Image (tube, grey):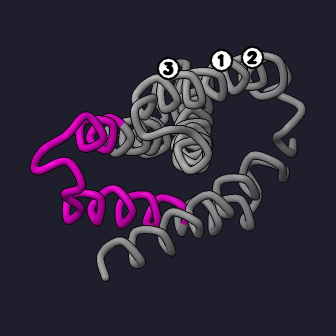
Amino acid sequence: TWGLVHLISANAALLLGTLVLLNKKGTPRHILIARIYLGAMVFTNGTSFALNNFGGFSPFHWLAVFSLASVLIGYSFVLRKKGNWLPHHVGWMSGSVVGLYAALAAEISVRFFDPEAFWWVVILASSSVIFIGIYFIIRFQVKTLPSYFKK
């Protein structure tokens, strides 16, 4: 049951995070979708702790801690709005979406390879997505940041 709940919330977070990345920033729609995304991420990470596929606290639980921290840190920049907050907010929040895609890539990839290669497949699939995601964050989110916001 927890696996299904986690899957549904993760898919919702993935969809919402993608919408936030692709749409204009700073609009009421952005703010609404982003807040729902934040809730979905908190719920997704929370439900991950109910899953014990490796006999206890696993590396995936540590990744959930990091994922939760990244989305909360990203949102904290919006709450404070001090100094050069905007690039930090964009970087952390975009990174949290990339993390979701990395988890998805790892989850899908392990279905197609021998279980003996599990960790290598997880590392290769997720790190590939992370490197591609970092490239796109730098290229399209951070460098073109001002053009995303209405004046």
Label pair 2/3, CB-CB below 8 angstroms: no
**Amino acid type for the residue under numbered disc 2:** Tyr
Query: Nearer the observer, disc 2 or disc 3?
Result: 2
Task: From the top left corner, tell me how far across and down residue 52 is, in percent.
Answer: 19, 57
Q: Residue at x 32, y 38 (%)?
A: 69
Q: Residue at x 52, y 29 (%)?
A: 121
Looking at the image, tell me whether mark 3 or mark 1 is earlier in sequence order: 3
Mark 2 Cα within 10 Å, few/some/many (few <14, many 20+)? few
Tag of residue 131: 1
**Magenta region:** 37-66
Verify whether residue 38 appears in magenta: yes
Residue closest to the eye, 47 or 110? 110
C-alpha gap between disc 2 and disc 1: 6 Å
C-alpha gap between disc 2 and disc 3: 25 Å
Which residue is under mark 3?
83
Tag of residue 84: none
Q: Secondary structure at mark 3?
A: loop
Judged left or right of residue 113, residue 23 is right
Label pair 2/1, CB-CB below 8 angstroms: yes
Q: Quadrant of residue 142?
A: top right
Q: Residue at x 84, y 38 (%)?
A: 148
- Report the predominant secondary structure element of the magenta stretch: helix
**Amino acid type for the residue under numbered disc 3:** Gly
Task: From the top left corner, tell me how far across and down residue 104 is, in percent.
Answer: 58, 48
Looking at the image, tell me whether mark 2 or mark 3 is earlier in sequence order: 3
Query: Nearer the observer, disc 3 or disc 1?
Result: 1
C-alpha gap between disc 3 and disc 1: 28 Å
Tag of residue 135: 2
Mark 1 Cα within 10 Å, few/some/many (few <14, many 20+)? few
Q: Secondary structure at mark 2?
A: helix
